Structures are given as C-alpha cells and as structure tokens.
Image (cartoon, coloured by chain):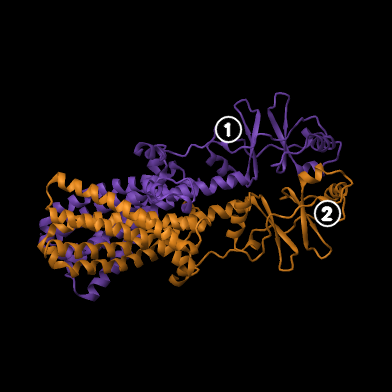
Chain colours: A orange, B purple
Amino acid sequence: MMMNRMNTNAIRTQRVEEIMSREPLALSPMMRAGEALARLRQVGVPRDFMANCYVVDERFCLLGLVTVRDLIMAPTGKRLDQFMAQPAARLHPEDDQERAVEEMDRLDQVELPVVDEQDRLVGTVTADDAMDVMQAEATEDMERMAAMAPSERPYLRTRVWDLYRSRIFWLLLLMLSAAFTGAIITHFENALAAQVVLTAFIPMLMDTGGNCGSQSSVTVIRGLSLGEIKSGDWLRVMWKELQVGLLCGGTLAAVNMARLCLLGSTDFPVALAVSLTLIVTVTCAKLLGCCLPILASRMRLDPAVMASPLITTIADAVSLVVYFRIAVCLLKL
Amino acid sequence: MMMNRMNTNAIRTQRVEEIMSREPLALSPMMRAGEALARLRQVGVPRDFMANCYVVDERFCLLGLVTVRDLIMAPTGKRLDQFMAQPAARLHPEDDQERAVEEMDRLDQVELPVVDEQDRLVGTVTADDAMDVMQAEATEDMERMAAMAPSERPYLRTRVWDLYRSRIFWLLLLMLSAAFTGAIITHFENALAAQVVLTAFIPMLMDTGGNCGSQSSVTVIRGLSLGEIKSGDWLRVMWKELQVGLLCGGTLAAVNMARLCLLGSTDFPVALAVSLTLIVTVTCAKLLGCCLPILASRMRLDPAVMASPLITTIADAVSLVVYFRIAVCLLKL
C-alpha cells in the first residue's frame, strides 16, 4: 500500500489518448469548399465538433486543417488544399496530457489534432478536455505540496478512510524525520540547560525558515509546471534566490534585533545569536527551496513532492544547528 | 505599499468584460439556415469565431444559439428559431472571471455568451481565455498558500526587489506572531529547566501540527475554489476532519510511543505526554485547517490566505500550550 502511494509521486503519466475524441472530421484535399459543407451535412457532424475540419491524404496522413470559418468564407468552388492551414501543433496519443494542456494554452488553441507515428490523424483534443486536465493537475500539485497523495474524487464524496490513507504516509515520514531535529537539540542539551532562554526562539526560527523555504519552493515548482522555468536554469534561479534570501534574512534580522532591544528583556548576545541565525537560516531555506524541486525535476520526479513540508523538515535541522553553533560561540557556553 | 500588498489579498475581482470578445455573431430568429450561412459569408466571420452563432431579437436580447454544427446540418429552409438552443449559461460583464471558468469547466462548454442586465448580447468568453484565467488563478492560490503576494510576471523575468517585496510582508507578520509562541515557552521556563528533555520534542510536535493543518487547509481551499465545497458545508467538513484528525493523531501517537519505548532513552511519562499531545495537536490542527478557510470565504476574503503558514503559526501555539499543560500534569512539574 505504501509503495503504491509512493509510486503515485512519480510524474503523472496520463496520456493524450485517454482524453482525445476519436472521430475527427477528415476530408480530402481535392474536395471543394461547397462539397465539404455538403459532405458534412451528409455524414453528420460529430457531436463534439468544434471548429476544425482536417484534411488528410488517402493513407489518412494529416495534411492540414480548414476551420469552419474558412469553409464558410471560401468560394464554394475553391479546393481545400488551396486554403488549408497547418495545425499549430500535433499531439501524439502517448504524449503526456500535460503537454496537450501546455501547447493549447501557449498557442491559444481550442483544438489540436492527434497523429500517430506515421502522422496519421487519430483524434483531436479539445479545450473542454484540456480544462479538466488543467484543474486536475493544479489540484494534484497543491496536494503534493501539502504532503498528501493526490485524491481522485471531490472532498465531500471522499471517505474518511481514504482521506486518512492519502495523508498518513507523509505525516509519519515527516514525523520520524523530525526526530533528527530532536536529536540535534539533545546534542546541545548542555547549552540549553545553561541558557533556557534559547529555547524560546526555537519556534520562531523554525517557522521562519519553513516559511521562506515554502515561498521559494512553491514559486519554483509552479514555474517548472507552467514551463516558465526549465531545469537548466538552476544557476540563474539559485543566484536570484540567494539575493532574495539575503534581503529577506537581513530585514527579518534587523526587525527582530530592534524588537528584542526595545523590549529589553533579552541579553544582547542572545539577541545577536538569534538575528545572525535568521540571516543564515533564511538564505539556506531559500536556496533549499529552489534547489530541491529543480533536482527532483532533473531526476524525473514530480517537483511538487519537494515542497514545503519536506523542505521545512530539512530547514529546521539546518536552522537549529546554525543557531546552537552561533549561540555556543557568542555566549561561550 | 504594504497596505497595497494587503489589498491584493481580497478576493480577485477581475471581470469577465476584460477577457470577453466583443463581436459575437448575432442573427435574427426569422433567418433561415441557408440565409444564415450566406450572411456569415457576406459579413465575414470574426477571427476568434468558435462554434456558436447567437440569435437575438431586434433589441439585441439573446434568444438562443445555433451551433455551426446545427447550421450545417439543418435543411437550408429551416428558420433559426425552429432549431436554436438555449445557452448552457449566461455570463455578465461584471461577473468575476472565476465564475466564467467555473461555468465553462462545469458545463463542458468552450464558449459562453455574455449579456448585460437587459439580457442584451454584449460578447462571448472562449475556452482559450478561460484557460489563461484558470492557470493564473491556480498560481495565485498557490502563492497565497505559501504566504506570498501574487506575482504578475514569470519568475525569471521578475526582479529580485519585486520578489523580495512580494515575500517580506508575510514573513515579517509570521515572524512577529511566532513571538507569541516564544512567550508560551518562556511562561513554562521552569518546567523546561527541570526537564530539558521536553525541548527535544518541540520541533517534531510543531512540524507535525503544521503539516496536518496544511493538509486540511489546502484540501479545503482547493475544494472551495473548485466549487466542490460550499461555505454552508462547514459542519460536514468539520465532522470529516475531526474523524481524520483522530485517526491520524492516533496513528502518529502510537508510532511515536512505540519508537520512544523501543529506543528506551525516554522516560515513560515524557513519552506519554508527547503522544497525548500529538493526538490533541493533530486534531486541533485539522479542525483549524478546515475552519479558517471556510471562515475566510464567509467573510468574502480569499480562503487561500488562510493556508499553511498562518495555520502553522496558530497550530504551534496550540501544540505548545497543550504539550506543556500535559507535561506539567504527568510529570508533576
């Protein structure tokens, strides 16, 4: 069961052939516009007919397409091959559905033809199918980002047991990983016993690191999924996140320092240790948040798995080690 | 500036009129199919013509529609009002774009007419526009869920300064809120000083609470945005999350208890305190995670703002209070 759940984290491989319509309107290139309209009347236009008629040769290879707009506008005597256009893109039955959606969205098309390896017309994908895929993909990404196995049905119709199963695996995994964070604290127990005040800043440091990491990871995951970021861009992305991380870390450290000094209840070395840790933690979390999704994408895993919760767990460990190391130095513990 | 950023967290109010095409094909109900085709040829079919011709009366009120499929299939002498159909839905120029997307997706339409308050045809929305809106909405939701102000341009073309600005506000707000969590720890400083080992479980409890909260909140936010959950369903949602929370909490507590007992390095009362806290925290986080987005939706705020980071911060405070209260009781501190 758990292996099964794990497997669903591989990149979605649902194919175009599952959503395509299998009865595209195919006409001969020698047909004339008037004949084409007559033929449409005669054979009956398929119910999910959109706005394209496809022009194919005798072996059913796709030569071009004629929109109904063109068909109506053309002089009745004009041959289809005289005014047919090339499709904006050709899909294949074994293509990932995501590709269909990307192409339709990028090319502003409401219908794309599907051809086999011999370029024979086998179907079409229409915008209403693509919209369903698009919504499902976005939902799936969000669920993965929140450390859940993707669900198949609407929430209110999902049984409690299925919700439980889709959630418990990641919760267990992350809980057990967090035990390492606990081990770090145990390792620095003496420092903590000497300065219990250090404990009070642990939640703030952990949360801030986690938030910074999820900001970066969600941005990068979405960018990858929309095709705005390619995995080859990793150096540019890291450089950008490094700068944003230093800016955010610096601001947070300054505000935190000001707050602690104004309140006056915290010793200066402790406040300094917390602020320095913030800069390091925020920068590390931002870098982790952009690297892990890109790494996943290079390894052909779904980048969405590398989202907030996993990064939070790693960022926690980093921030605690940094925090205690800095504190031990500054406070001479 | 910050107020400006805050305002963008109100529900997206981009209107249908911004994406609609303004030149729908309008025909008279008395026209015959053959005449309609001739007219189309004569006036020229608009470039973004999809598959519908609209039938309007003399005041341009929308009476029905004729798909090009129907137009081609109908006997040339048939009057449009004899075979026109009602549109699956009518949009209004001032409708939220999200409504357009929802209706098209729900009704599997690739084009919907837009009418004004007097039911006069003013435009149409097509699937390619809806797909752009759909992607933008999903991106925006993900950004809000990760505590960022929505961005307007692709990542690689966004300046570092703009990325910084879209992220720093929530980071500061959440960092300052986490100070309350710190105050809780300070309040229980004596208990902690007596049992430093309690500190080692803080990260695990906080992370698990946060993860549980974001699982629920992301599920509910997505359900709300897809229209699968209505804000009136709050009682059903809470009841479901309560059950899932108890199941997850119970499992996590059992595994945690087993792990601590097997390792043997933790006293039984401490292990018991941690496990009991897990059950309470997980259940509270699940309930928070479903209530806050629904509450936001009732207050006409974007539910996505109530996602993981905010809920994590609240869940942290809850889990720490619960943890220390239980520990103080069980360990007689």
Q: Which residue is mark 1?
A: B93
- Number of residues whose C-alpha sits closer than 10 Å to that of mark 1, classed few (under 14), some (14–19) or many (20 or more): many
Give the CA distance from mark 2 to mark 1. Answer: 40 Å
- Residue A228 position, x and y percent, is 51, 55
Which quadrant holds the C terminus of chain A? bottom left
Q: Which residue is mark 2?
A: A81
Q: Is residue B74 left or right of residue A289?
A: right
- Residue B64 position, x and y percent, is 71, 34
Image height of B270 relative to A207, above or below: below
Q: Amino acid at mark 1?
A: Pro
Q: Amino acid at mark 2?
A: Asp
Q: Is residue B244 visible?
A: no
Image height of B65 relative to A22, above or below: above
- Number of residues whose C-alpha sits closer than 10 Å to that of mark 2, classed few (under 14), some (14–19) or many (20 or more): some
- Residue A1 position, x and y percent, is 45, 71
- Residue B242 position, x and y percent, is 35, 53
Residue at 36% in and 55% down: A243
Chain of the residue that carries numbered disc 2 in the rendered image = A
Quarter-wise, where is residue A122 in the image? bottom right
Residue at 41% in and 63% down: A291
Q: Secondary structure at mark 1?
A: loop
Q: Secondary structure at mark 2?
A: helix
